[in-house]
Amino acid sequence: MRNILALALTFGAAGPALAAEGPFLSLGNTDFVVLLAFLLFVGILLLAKVPGLLGNQLDNRAEAIQKELDEARALREEAQTILASYERKQQEVQAQADQIVAAARDEAARAADVAKADLETSIARRLAAAEEQIASAEASAVKEVRDQAISIAVAAADQVISKQMTAAEANKLIDAAIADVDAKLH
C-alpha cells in the first residue's frame, strides 16, 4: 500500500503539465483528491484481498457450472441408455407378438383341416345311410336326406365356430356339403 501511494505521489508531482489550476499536490486540486481517493480505495480492496475473493467465487461458480454440465451429460447418457433399452424391449415384444399371431394362424388352419375332414367323414356316413334308404323309399328318402344334410351343415358350422373358424370359411363348407349331397341325390 505504501509503495502504491508513493508511486502515485511521485507521478502526481512529476507532471507539471497537469498543474494548470495551481499546484497538483494541493488538497484544493480536485484531480489530486480524486486520485488519492481512488488509490486509497484500490489499496483497501487489495488489503481486504477482494480480488482473491472474487477469483475464488468465480472459480467456485465455474466449478459448480462444470458439475452441472457433467451431471446433465450423465443424465443425457442415462436417458439414451434407457431409450435404447425400451427400444430393444419393444422390438422383442413385437417379435413375440408376431410369433403368437403366426402360431394362431397355424392353429386355425389345422383346426379348419380337422373340421373339414370330420365334416367329410360325417357326410360320407350320412350318404351311405341315405343310399340304403333310397332303395326302400326314394321319395321320402330325398326329403329325409335333405333334412339330414341341413342338420349336418348346422352341426359342422357349430364345430367350426367352436374352433374359431371364420364365418366365410364356414359358409363355404356348408355350401359345399349341400351341393355335394344335392349332386349325389339327383
Image: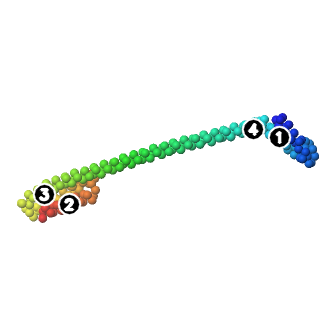
Kind of residue sitting beneath label 1? Leu
Looking at the rendering, in which quadrant would you find the N terminus? top right
Find the distance from the CA under tag 3 to the CA under tag 2: 14 Å
The image position of residue 79, as x and y in percent, is 51, 44
Taking depth in this image into account, of 5 and 87 the one nearest to the observer is 5
Q: Which residue is labeled 4 in the image?
A: 50
Find the distance from the CA under tag 4 to the CA under tag 1: 15 Å
Q: Which residue is labeled 1 in the image?
A: 39
Residue 150, can we see it?
Answer: no
Which residue is outermost to the right?
22
Taking depth in this image into account, of 92 and 128 the one nearest to the observer is 92
Label 3: how many Cα within 10 Å (few below 14, some 14–19, many 20+) = some
Of labels 2 and 1, earlier in sequence is 1
Find the distance from the CA under tag 1 to the CA under tag 3: 125 Å
Of labels 4 and 2, earlier in sequence is 4
Q: Which residue is labeled 3 in the image?
A: 127
Looking at the rendering, in which quadrant would you find the C terminus? bottom left
